[in-house]
Amino acid sequence: MNQPVARTRIQRKNIRLISDAALSVFSTYGFRGATVDQIAKEANLSKPNLLYYFPTKEAIHRHLLSTLMDTWLDPLRDMDPDGEPLEEILTYLRRKLQMSRDHPRESRLFANEIVQGAPHILDLLATDLKALVDDKAATLTRWMDEGRINRTDPHHLIFSIWSLTQHYADFEVQVGAVLGPEKPDPYPEAEAYLTTLFTRMLTPDA
Amino acid sequence: MNQPVARTRIQRKNIRLISDAALSVFSTYGFRGATVDQIAKEANLSKPNLLYYFPTKEAIHRHLLSTLMDTWLDPLRDMDPDGEPLEEILTYLRRKLQMSRDHPRESRLFANEIVQGAPHILDLLATDLKALVDDKAATLTRWMDEGRINRTDPHHLIFSIWSLTQHYADFEVQVGAVLGPEKPDPYPEAEAYLTTLFTRMLTPDA
DNA sequence: CGTGCCTTTGACCAAAGGGTCAAAAGTAAT
DNA sequence: ATTACTTTTGACCCTTTGGTCAAAGGCACG
């Protein structure tokens, strides 16, 4: 059971339980701050039972990160070079925002990992992620060359979409504290604000 | 030595050493992931010696957070209700970006704290920070009423400045990995990009 | 129902962690 | 040089933590 390639029904169920529990715990405390006991308790398993499915704490963490990495980048991957530029970018923006709303723990897992120096995925960032971003940046540059969106730095454009959307998941408690209890769901306003922001930024000058 | 009110030269020196070391360690591993031994080693002190100045690990962390909180909010506090709106906002933006560049560890300390649910400062966020933001949001709203900047959601405008600027400190390794080693300093481009972004967003339509 | 495999667990271990303490080593002012 | 005070340290303690192991308890299938 070194890599969790689930064969039986029980395995599938428990690996799902553990992954979910670990996601909660790692995203709340970071890798070093999380404990195996805590994950086990959250999953309603005994610690040795948990370690029967994943040999080490690191293996659980690795499993989560690699499972999530792909999902996380899908929206960017799906940005269509042949689509209508502004529409493609706004769709990307909205999908990212939707991911913050629907999967805040996943977002915070990555946030923890990266804030802490990305010790477990630094190589992936410098290879896979860089390649994808460079590719999409080239598409953005072409759109700018064609005069279909305003000229600007494509990499920083992408960074800005990341930071703005992930902020609502990663800094959820701060957003909640500042907006106060009478505004429990900031996402509708966020979407309107961000749509305007990028529309104004990118719509070609007359 | 319950609260570090430095009296002697040695105390001042060691409290400075400890604070600096603790900043590095807490900002890299989060509160629970950090160890007292590690902070002590980083400060070139023995563990008992460190604990002579701060009674507990929590006390060091509290000391850092409360010391930094004020500094951190100064740029927003300084946004002048009687100034030129766009200029005030862009100055705020640039000062925040400068803080990310000059004090990335401080930024990551807060990022860790807030990503992990802000257990130690949640009350401050809901009181002091909320009050300050609400106050400045009112100023922004007035500027919009006066037609001096475009109308938009003032709270989300502030959130966007936070997220965009802090991104460069908090996600430093990711930015570095994506831009690659030949672009070691992203800040000039970031400043140009963000200036354009907010200028386009806020300059009143003709 | 018996056999063989999968799953679960209580007991245990060594290392690391936060923190204490009494005694030693400095420091400063007389 | 003495005195009174501050600073530093080695040794120690208890708890938490990541991980092991052998034995017990299920489960499926002929």
Image (cartoon, coloured by chain):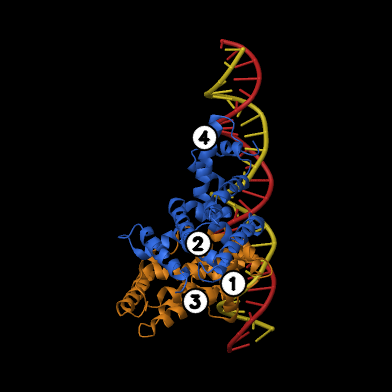
Chain colours: A blue, B orange, C red, D yellow
Q: Residue at position x 35%, y 85% from top?
A: B82
Q: Chain of mark 3?
A: B
Q: Is residue A189 left or right of residue A148?
A: left
Under circle 3, the secondary element is: helix
Q: The disc numbered 1 marks a residue on which chain?
A: B
For disc 2, the marked residue is A85
Type of amino acid at the residue the image marks with label 3: Thr
Number of the front mark, 3 or 1:
3
Badge 4 amino acid: Lys
- Specify the amino acid type for callout 1: Asp
Please tell me whether mark 2 sits on a helix, a strand or a loop: helix
In the image, residue A9 sits, relative to residue B113, either above or below, namely above
Question: Which residue, given by chain and number where applicable, does mark 1 sit on?
Answer: B20
Measured in 3D between alpha carbons, the distance from the residue under mark 3 to the one under mark 1, in whole angstroms, is 32 Å
The residue that label 4 is drawn on is A13
Q: State the image coordinates of residue B171 (x, y, percent, origin top left).
A: 56, 64
Kindly identify which chain the residue marked by label 2 belongs to: A
Alpha carbon separation for disc pair 2 and 3: 22 Å
Q: Are marks 2 and 1 in contact (CB under 8 Å)?
A: no
Is circle 2 on the same chain as circle 3?
no
Closer to us: mark 2 or mark 4? 2
Nearest to viewer (mark 2 / mark 3): 2
Q: Secondary structure at mark 1?
A: helix
The answer to the question of whether label 2 and label 3 lie on touching residues, with beta carbons closer than 8 A, is no
Horizontal side of C13 relative to C30 (left or right) equals: right
Residue where numbered disc 3 is placed: B195
* SS type, badge 4: helix
Mark 4–mark 3 distance (CA, rounded to whole Å): 50 Å
Q: Are marks 1 and 4 in contact (CB under 8 Å)?
A: no
Residue count near mark 1 (Cα–Cα under 10 Å), binned few <14, some 14–19, many ≥20: some
CB under 8 Å between discs 3 and 1 = no
